[in-house]
Amino acid sequence: MKKIVAVTGCPTGIAHTYMAQESLQEAAKKLEVEIKVETNGASGVENRLTAAEIEAAEGVIVAADVDVNLDRFNGKAVIDTSVQDGIHRPEELIEQILAGEAEIRQGVKQSQPEKAANASIGRQIYKHLMNGVSKMLPFVVGGGILIAVSFLWGIHSADPNSDQYNAIAAMLNQLGGTAFGLMVPILAGYIAFSIADKAGLAAGFVGGVVARDTGAGYLGGILIGFFAGYLMAYCKKLMANFPKQLEGLKSIFLLPLIGIFISGTLMYLLGAPVSAANQALKAQLEAIQTANPIILGIVIGCMSAFDMGGPVNKAAYITGTMLLGEGNYEFMAGVSAACITPPLLTALATTIFRKEFTEEEKANGLVNYILGSTHITEGAIPFAAQNPLVVIPILMIGSSISAVLTYMLQIEVPAPHGGFLILPLVNKPFLWVGTILLGSLVGALLYGFYRKHSNRKLTAK
Amino acid sequence: MEINEFINEELIKLNLKSQSKQAVIEELAAVAAAAGVITDQQQIITAALEREAKGTTGVGKGVAIPHVKSSAVKKPAVIFGRSQSGIDYQSMDEKLSYLFFLITVPENSHDQHLKLLAQLSRNLVHADFREKLMAAQNKTEVIDVLTNH
């Protein structure tokens, strides 16, 4: 017997919801179709559809005058109509589904709310994070490679005041920079989108742009993405009982306004403490620049790998460039080593532990050889962002090893950027590459074994 | 709990006089007020009309179920009215309505009340249920149909 699922709902939730339910069930009986009808009435949702039932159904009839969650039907044939149609034309609706006349609902097929509710909080957060990371990845890869290519004309080729200046290189560099600039907003936007659907996107995206502009980096982006997503999910819940006539006002006007205002403002207000932290770190760093190389290396390594492009990383990088101006070439050597390590580390991990990574990650890893070699730390962000609590510490360990060794060997790097392209300017080029590879390799092994372990755990379940 | 906890002979009017939507709501509200299940007749009428403005409760098949969730409701009740000549209730199917159920529930209604009312709504979909209500000779028979269907 063919199966169909349906959802009914009406503003007061006392009568129409149940009449439509009964009508659909009667019609289904007549047409010899099995049907399950979820009712969204005054006493809440009854007969809630399960993921398996939706999956097994030929199609979905939504006969409701209130907002019901439709995303769970993505990829199914869906008729979205009024509760009146459910009461009066149940047979037609069912026949339309059986005849395959209903439109397939677009959108990403997502795991079902009922499933999500069962899933642990950790699992849900991971799902939202991955949604953001996978959307961000193309920006990192495309933008990163364009920037790396621009270095082929020389590491200052985008600077009009340099004699290396080349118009094409400058354009490539700018394009790459534009793509990088979208990284954090896309990450934040799609984390929020994953949590709260369309309502989340605007709030998360704008919050992400503010996070980028205030220098809060990708960790700021992740925070604001989750904040915006849960905020919007909450607002949607508060407004769930709005009559359908106000639906437009709600989704086109109220939700975006509230979301953009609150998450934008929050991120904006966070700007001051973020920049204060950045300043404080810089002051601290200058104070310890002459410290013992092991301590300095660990501090620099941890800072550089911590938030790649965020306030902590920038504090190390900017202090490094400042000290370069004062003729201290050693400090920058450690910073560069620590910044090159994270992408190289992930590249090595995906090469050595091929079986433990997805195709997407392996492609990202391959690109990271180029991004790492050219000091584009951002290449590691997609790896770090999908599991920050584990991956960031691993990156920190790798970067610290690279930086400590660099300082111990008194390597001098006189340029602030360019990665291995500036090797001719480095006093001990082979040793420098060696320290970086060693730090990356240790980290890669840690990362790979962690993946192996967590993958086993997943399949064992 | 049974449906007859919501309805009794005092809440039934078998010969509605009204000819319009507003009039029939007023007529049913007056029945409810007389039986003492609501405190403020005007408030109930207003609330019912507001609900109608969001979309008619004339669900077709000759049935209308105006309903109100309001603090002016003392106890959940179903007020049943019947018109032999039919009333233009601006029904979904644009036909006349004969059977009227004014459903009143207090603001903080029990889930069980709602479930019973849901069951009544489901019954209304069935033609034989409606036919029996149309054919009922007196109030006792109406209650009998409602309780025993």
Image (cartoon, coloured by chain):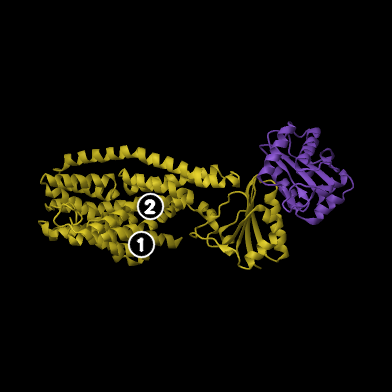
Chain colours: A yellow, B purple
Near-viewer residue (A201 or B96): B96
Q: Secondary structure at mark 1?
A: helix
Question: Local crowd at mark 2 within 10 Å, few (<14), some, or many (≥20)?
Answer: many
Q: Tell me what residue is drawn at x 79 percent, y 56 percent.
A: B127
Image check: A425 left or right of A335? left
Q: Chain of mark 1?
A: A
Figure quadrant of residue A241: top right
State the mark number for residue A187. 2
Q: CA distance from mark 2 to mark 1?
A: 26 Å
Circle 1 residue: A452
Q: Are marks 2 and 1 on the same chain?
A: yes
Near-viewer residue (A89 or B71): A89
Image spot of residue A205 (x, y percent): 40, 49
Residue A441 seen in the current view: no
Amino acid type, callout 1: Lys
Image check: B51 left or right of A110? right
Image spot of residue A298 (x, y percent): 21, 48
Image spot of residue A259 (x, y percent): 45, 43
Residue A107 seen in the current view: yes
Task: Look at the picture and state if A359 lies above or below A43.
Answer: below
Amino acid type, callout 2: Leu
Near-viewer residue (A33 or B137): B137
Question: Local crowd at mark 1 within 10 Å, few (<14), some, or many (≥20)?
Answer: some
Q: Earlier in the sequence, mark 2 or mark 1?
A: 2
Q: Residue furthest top?
A: B39
Q: Secondary structure at mark 2?
A: helix
